[in-house]
Image (cartoon, rainbow, N blue to C red):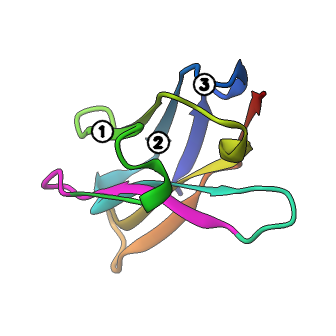
Amino acid sequence: QVQLVESGGGLVQAGGSLSLSCVASGAIYSIDTMGWYRRAPGNLRELVATITGSSTTNYAESVKGRFTISRDNTKNTVYLQMNSLNPEDTAVYYCNVDGVEIYGQFGRYNYWGQGTQVTVSS
């Protein structure tokens, strides 16, 4: 199957930056959309940003102009550069891949990473 491994979370002061990475591994033929979601304490999981195979991006209004999503299709990796962080960005950040085609299997699949904690102190 497919596994997602996230890295790059941590503790940062308000105004600082962090960069997240997520590597998808397994018998992957292609991935349609890669993205990041987050869940703050007491809240539902929400979209942060997504990027399609043709590099079309979509951002939550709250992160536009501060976060940048990118991907490396040769490495099945998605990145999230987060700048000008504020305490409201504190959450567990989850990587997601959608429309995954796997060698030898029919269908398209969706997978989630285990999450990485981002904490922004004021």
Is residue 96 shown above or below 85? below
How far apart are labels 3 and 2 at the CA level? 18 Å
Is residue 121 shown above or below 57? above
Asked if residue 121 lies left or right of residue 103, the reply is: right
Q: Amino acid at mark 2?
A: Ser
Asked if residue 33 lies left or right of residue 88, the reply is: left
Residue under label 1, please give it. Answer: 70
Q: Are marks 1 and 3 in contact (CB under 8 Å)?
A: no
Which class describes the residues within 10 Å of circle 3: few (<14), some (14-19), or many (20+)?
Answer: some
Q: Position of residue 27 (x, y in %)?
A: 39, 50
Q: Residue at x 47, y 42 (%)?
A: 25
Q: Which residues are magenta?
A: 45-56
How far apart are labels 1 and 2 at the CA level? 17 Å
**Callout 1: SS:** strand
Q: Amino acid at mark 1?
A: Ser
Residue under label 2, please give it. Answer: 25
Q: Which of these two is toward me, 40 or 96?
A: 40
Q: Amino acid at mark 3?
A: Gly
Q: Residue at x 46, y 46 (%)?
A: 26
Which residue is most to the right? 42
Residue under label 3, please give it. Answer: 8
**Callout 3: SS:** loop
Ranked by sequence position, the earlier of labels 3 and 2 is: 3
Ranked by sequence position, the earlier of labels 1 and 2 is: 2
Whether the magenta-drawn stretch holds residue 4 is answered as: no
Q: Are marks 3 and 2 in contact (CB under 8 Å)?
A: no
Q: Position of residue 115 (x, y in %)?
A: 70, 46
Q: Which of these two is toward me, 49 or 65?
A: 65
Q: Which of these two is toward me, 105 or 39?
A: 39
Is residue 21 shown above or below 65? above
